[in-house]
Image (spheres, rainbow, N blue to C red):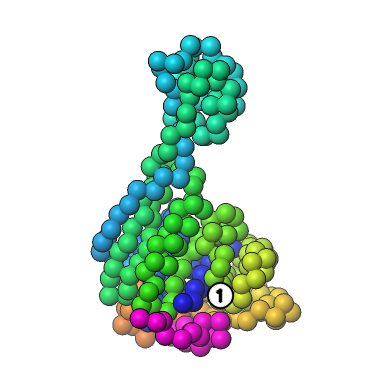
Amino acid sequence: MKQIAIISGKGGTGKTAIAASFAVLATDKIIADCDVDASNLYLLLNPAIKAKSEFRGSKTAVIDAKRCTECCICEENCRFDAICECVIDPILCEGCGVCVISCPEDAICLEDNVSGYTYISDREYGPMSHAELKIAEEATGKLITAVRNNSIELTRHHNLILIDGPPGIGCPVIASLSGVDMALIVTEPSQSGVHDLKRILGVVAHFGVKPVVCINKYDINEEVTEEIEAFCREGGVEIAGKIPFNVSITKAMVAGVPVVETGLKTDAGGAIERMWVRINQSNCLTTKSPDV
């Protein structure tokens, strides 16, 4: 079983549009939407939900009124102003546990919160593992790990896990990236795109994952595209594909259809198909059929 993560150093590069097209083009795969803060791949593929589970990734302090002597030591030690007159505001509470440690009566404990939900879904593209993080929750990395674990459990009869990862370089990206065989980094020809490409390549190198780069909308600024190509060439990073700007991609996203499934023969759709063929034939993703 092999894993490929589609990531980007910044948002808005077209990562999810490409992931959706790969979900159509790839065979014998599991789809994992690890961008749990903004799970747009689920919206685009619109699979049927088969199973739903609660995810408990954060904690909130709770006071036992019967044991509390209202000494207010917990309130004095709370750095988030979450305790007032021995009442805890669950919105302000960060679950740090200082109040638990400082309470002389052992009247405070930390209780698990329902931070979100994990889902197992299905469509003609194949099984899909995804999740929903509740508003203001911060357990993104843990939830992504749960999504990946669910996808691994689904791979008994599949060769590939196709991961739509989050943008950036933080904890969510690390949780999506660790242990994968290849990272497709989607960038764009802008100064911010170049800057964030360099940062995410550093993260990928740290985890020893093979990187390949896709330059989306490469023809909107060919001078910067040449800069990206030169940088990748100097670093020995393969350019897996270059996708031209085309309004067909925007129209497909608005219609909720993967670009390569619109039936329109566009240069952008063709570029995505050729890129998938190139990636699929890479030594990093070549694997034997799974044992049944």
Corner quadrant of residue 18 = bottom left
Q: Is residue 284 magenta?
A: yes
Instruction: Please give the range of residues in magenta.
Output: 273-292
Q: Is residue 248 magenta?
A: no
Q: Is residue 191 visible?
A: no
- Give the residue drawn at x 36%, y 55%: 118
| Vertical side of 79 occupied by 283: above or below | below
Residue 152 x %, y %: 42, 67
**Which secondary structure, mark 1?**
strand
* Quarter of the C terminus within the rendering: bottom left
Residue under label 1: 182
- Give the residue drawn at x 46%, y 15%: 68
- Give the residue drawn at x 42%, y 85%: 289
Residue 240 x %, y %: 56, 82
Q: Is residue 71 visible?
A: yes
Main SS, magenta region, reads loop
> How would you rate the neighbour count of disc 1 (Cα within 10 Å): few for under 14, some for 14-19, many for 20 or more?
many
Residue 115 x %, y %: 41, 44
Tag 1: amino acid:
Met
Apparent side of residue 2 relative to residue 251 in the rendered image (left or right): right
Corner quadrant of residue 214 = bottom right
- Give the residue drawn at x 32%, y 73%: 126
| Vertical side of 102 occupied by 284: above or below | below
Corner quadrant of residue 184 = bottom right
| Vertical side of 276 occupied by 175: above or below | above
